[in-house]
Amino acid sequence: MKIVSLFSGCGGLDLGLIQAGHEIIWANDIFADAVETYRNNIASHVDDKDIREIPSSDIPDCDVIVGGFPCQGFSMANMKRDVEDIRNKLYRQMVRVIKDKKPKFFIGENVKGMASLGKGEVLKKIIKDFEKAGYDVRWHVVNAADYGVPQSRMRLIIFGVRKDIAIDEVFFPPETTHTDPEKAKRLKKKPWLTIGRALSHFPEPEDGSDIPNHEHSKYKLRFNGHLGHRRIDPNKPAPTVTGRGDEKGGVVVLHHPDNHR
């Protein structure tokens, strides 16, 4: 299917869709570094203009629209998250484009914290707006590890089907393929892919302090007086890399399971 991608970032969602056999025909993100990464690793069809200034007529027709609209205002890692955060309104641009382009399906992706913001009222409003655009809408929180990704990453997925298209409700969410190793045999699923197994085919890096093709950035080591260092457990999926840190607000620096940092 032909897909339009909004709030594309560096293209993680798009890459998965390409690997599943679909075609991304147009993408958009305003973050310059993400756009450069997208162009260098996926394709040059990414537009870097502000989506609020792009008329729907400039966006190609498609079968599916996907979008990971900004999550900072919803994220539980944001200790100052606010219902009125301006970033929380950007999903409306996705609603606008969907309403105008009328794709068969759409997929929205965000952090699970969106479900609890405003005691759940924010998510209800978002779902209602997508429904008003002419879609039957479902949402579900999924863990990427349950689908074979070597990382425990919880994400809220919104799936919409145009109202004139008949589809079986059991289609979403898709059945999980992996689970906790202790339950895998009983549930007839594969065990979670661990970070140790995922890294096992890579050669050991040479000792040294220089990282090739990488621009180092300075960052604040302490936050609220806390700083944590933690090795990734090689026998489990990797934890989610967050922009904040642990539940106390401290920075958590994740390290290789075995090698020195």
Image (spheres, rainbow, N blue to C red):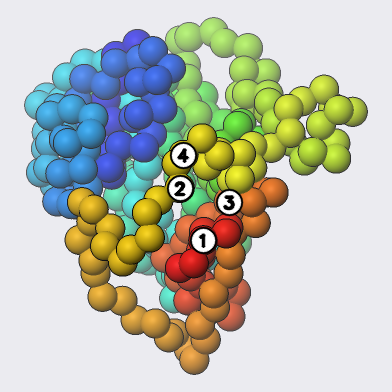
Mark 3 and mark 2: Cα distance apart in space: 19 Å
Task: Judge left or right: residue 144 versus residue 176.
Answer: left
Q: Earlier in the sequence, mark 3 or mark 2?
A: 2
Mark 1 and mark 3: Cα distance apart in space: 15 Å
Residue that numbered label 1 is attached to:
259
- Do labels 2 and 4 touch, CB within 8 Å? yes
Mark 1 and mark 4: Cα distance apart in space: 13 Å
Q: Earlier in the sequence, mark 1 or mark 3?
A: 3
Q: Nearer the viewer, residue 111 or 129?
A: 111
Quadrant location of the N terminus in the rendered image: top left
Q: Is residue 118 visible?
A: no
Q: Dot 3 surroundings within 10 Å: few (below 14), some, or many (20 or more)?
A: many
Residue that numbered label 4 is attached to:
202
Q: Dot 4 surroundings within 10 Å: few (below 14), some, or many (20 or more)?
A: few
Helix, strand or loop under label 3: loop
As drawn, the label of residue 238 is: 3
